[in-house]
């Protein structure tokens, strides 16, 4: 058994450039996300005489939820268009343009640091909406491009390295972002994020990617409906991405971390960075294990058990009054979630024809974004009604319930065994004949 993931996949230089871009952007996004969250919450809680809003904990937590909603609405409206674009346009150019827009938006965040809440918050929410527009196009292009950069037999290793690199960035990004915020302020965090995003643009712009093969004989919204139809017919893929949607929508505690750091655990920006990085520590550990020993049997049961464990760990985090116990619980949530992410990503990449990857990825990303950004809004609403602790406890119970319910709603997913067999079923499945 190998003690470390194989580095052979990086001999494909185009994939190496893509991987560097993905990790750099992930780190920049995580640093910005942790800073935006604390900045918004702090501005809301700060007394009005010092430039804040003077709101209560529950009101400020609800404002955090609105940041997630601002990012989700553009994703909901534009992701299917982004998936169609990824199948019809040059995917590399989409990544260059979208990441360039991301850099420009980061300068807006930098400007917000020097303004009072009445001016800073509209800028932050405006940037959040535009970032949602960017996120509607980037994931489909990225997830459709990288499978063409490596041979098909090396795709599982590339998926594992994608996840490992992403989770490493999610560990380092919030931790470093929180420390920089605590010692040097939000302006320095946004400046570092701009540098990382600029490096990402350079990395993908200099990659020698294969020429784009346009999809022929299919135009307009018929392309979108084909992607939706494929997912509807493939119950295993539908079950996997909808499971992730429901669990993270109700069970995610990420949006409320600034509340726990500032007013429940009392650990400030530095502690917030550690809390935000904790799930990624668990996820990166599991990603490393999966890169050395990929799941080969019982993929469906692994996913269901992981969701149940995620729910239990979320309950522990919500009820914990101790920083280190909270950190440990978040590590477990990240480890469990990584198994779900790995299974879902493998199903989509291995079972989807290349000419449909953009559309299927865009639909998948709507589910993922709904579970994250819209889930942040749900967390804010729940915290407004139940308090932050009650909101997290409710989410943990919902995750456990969903795992039990999905074993009945999607029995094929719950019994899924080998990825190879799932791939054969998906490829051989044809759309129903028209009447």
Image (cartoon, rainbow, N blue to C red):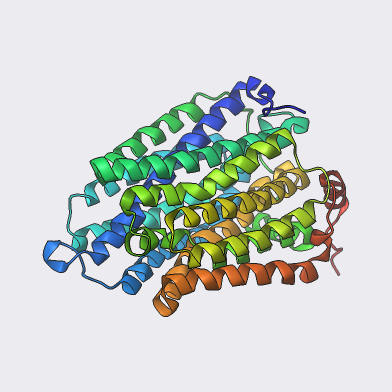
Q: Nearer the viewer, residue 36 or 289?
A: 289
Left or right of 140: which side holds 150? right
Number of marks present in the image shown: 0
Q: Specify whether residue 219 is in view.
A: no
Q: Position of residue 344 (x, y in %)?
A: 69, 51
Identify the image quadrant of the C terminus: bottom right
Q: Position of residue 202 (x, y in %)?
A: 44, 27
Q: Position of residue 297 (x, y in %)?
A: 83, 47
Q: Position of residue 265 (x, y in %)?
A: 37, 60
Left or right of 127: which side holds 428? right
Left or right of 429: which side holds 129? left
Identify the image quadrant of the N terminus: top right
Q: Residue at x 70, y 66 (%)?
A: 403
Residue found farthest to the bottom: 385
Q: Nearer the viewer, residue 5 or 360?
A: 5
Left or right of 314: which side holds 379? left
Q: Is residue 46 above or below residue 161?
A: below
Q: Residue at x 41, y 66 (%)?
A: 65
Residue found farthest to the left: 49
Q: Specify whether residue 342 is in view.
A: yes
Q: Residue at x 69, y 26 (%)?
A: 6
Q: Residue at x 42, y 70 (%)?
A: 388
């Amino acid at each position: 058994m190998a003690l470390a993931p194989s580095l052979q996949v990086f001999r494909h230089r185009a994939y190496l450039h893509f991987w560097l871009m993905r990790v750099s952007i992930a780190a920049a996004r995580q640093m910005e996300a942790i800073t935006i969250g604390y900045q918004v919450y702090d501005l809301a809680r700060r007394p009005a005489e010092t430039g804040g809003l003077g709101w209560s904990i529950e009101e400020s937590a609800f404002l955090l939820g609105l940041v997630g909603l601002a990012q989700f609405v553009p994703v909901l409206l534009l992701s299917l268009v982004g998936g169609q674009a990824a199948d019809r346009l040059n995917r590399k150019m989409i990544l260059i343009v979208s990441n360039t827009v991301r850099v420009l938006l980061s300068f807006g965040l930098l400007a917000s640091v020097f303004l009072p809440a009445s001016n800073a918050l509209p800028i932050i929410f405006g940037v959040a909406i535009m970032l949602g527009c960017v996120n509607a196009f980037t994931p489909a292009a990225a997830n459709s491009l990288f499978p063409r950069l490596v041979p098909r037999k090396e795709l599982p290793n590339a998926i594992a390295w994608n996840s490992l690199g992403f989770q490493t960035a999610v560990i380092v990004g919030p931790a470093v972002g929180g420390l920089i915020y605590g010692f040097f302020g939000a302006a320095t965090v946004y400046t570092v994020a701009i540098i990382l995003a600029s490096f990402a643009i350079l990395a993908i712009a200099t990659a020698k990617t294969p020429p784009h093969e346009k999809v022929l004989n299919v135009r307009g919204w018929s392309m979108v409906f084909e992607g939706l139809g494929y997912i509807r017919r493939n119950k295993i893929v539908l079950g996997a991405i909808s499971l992730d949607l429901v669990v993270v929508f109700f069970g995610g505690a990420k949006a409320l971390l600034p509340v726990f750091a500032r007013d429940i655990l009392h650990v400030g920006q530095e502690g917030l960075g550690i809390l935000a990085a904790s799930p990624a520590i668990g996820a990166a550990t599991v990603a490393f294990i999966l890169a050395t020993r990929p799941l080969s049997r019982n993929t469906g049961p692994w996913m269901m058990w992981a969701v149940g464990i995620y729910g239990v760990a979320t309950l522990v985090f919500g009820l914990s009054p101790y920083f280190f116990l909270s950190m440990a619980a978040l590590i477990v949530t990240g480890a469990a979630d990584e198994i779900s992410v790995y299974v879902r990503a493998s199903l989509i990449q291995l079972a989807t024809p290349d000419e449909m990857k953009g559309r299927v990825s865009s639909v998948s990303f709507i589910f993922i974004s709904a579970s994250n950004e819209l889930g942040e809004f749900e967390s804010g609403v729940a915290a407004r009604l139940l308090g932050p602790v009650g909101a997290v406890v409710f989410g943990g119970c919902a995750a456990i319930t969903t795992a039990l319910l999905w074993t009945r709603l999607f029995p094929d997913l719950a019994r899924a065994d080998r990825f190879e067999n799932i791939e054969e079923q998906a490829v051989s499945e044809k759309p129903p004949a028209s009447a």
